[in-house]
Image: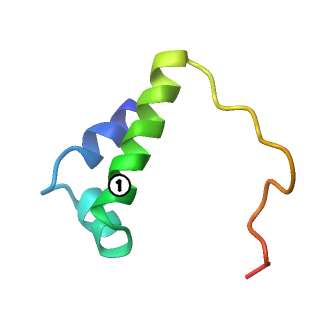
Amino acid sequence: MRGIRDHLCDESDPLYCAMADLLSQGEISATLHRIDRVLKSRRYPRPGGGANYPWPPV
């Protein structure tokens, strides 16, 4: 996850550029925030209640 975070912090990185084509800056920032939370807690978040998959199916 640290590697992904490093890529997303560099606006010239190919991964960042690919994500920026698909997501707003706010969504990229939210992704970085989620990565930081996982790195800090050293645990993946527990799934919430309800369906834990995309709905409706695509």
Residue, far top: 41
Nearer the observer, 26 or 38:
26
Q: Is residue 2 above or below residue 53?
A: above
Q: Is residue 50 above or below residue 9?
A: below
Residue, far bottom: 58
Instruction: Name the residue at 33% across, 49% down.
Output: 29
Q: Quadrant of residue 45?
A: top right
Q: Quadrant of residue 9?
A: top left
Instruction: Name the residue at 35% across, 55% down.
Output: 28
Colour style of the rendered protein structure: rainbow
Residue hosting label 1: 28
Q: Is residue 2 above or below residue 29?
A: above
Count of marks overlaid on the render: 1
Instruction: Name the residue at 73% across, 82% down.
Output: 58
Instruction: Name the residue at 35% across, 36% down.
Output: 3
Residue, far right: 50
Where residue 27 appears, as percent x and y from the top left, is 39, 58
Where residue 18 appears, as percent x and y from the top left, is 31, 68
Where residue 50 appears, as percent x and y from the top left, is 87, 52
Where residue 39 appears, as percent x and y from the top left, is 46, 23
Q: Is residue 50 above or below residue 2?
A: below
Question: On the picture, is 32 further left or further right than 57?
Answer: left
Within-10-Å neighbours for mark 1: few <14, some 14–19, many 20+: some
Residue, far left: 12
Q: Quadrant of the N terminus?
A: top left
- Label 1 sits on a secondary structure element that is helix
Report the amino acid beneath label 1.
Ile
Question: On the picture, is 47 further left or further right than 12?
Answer: right
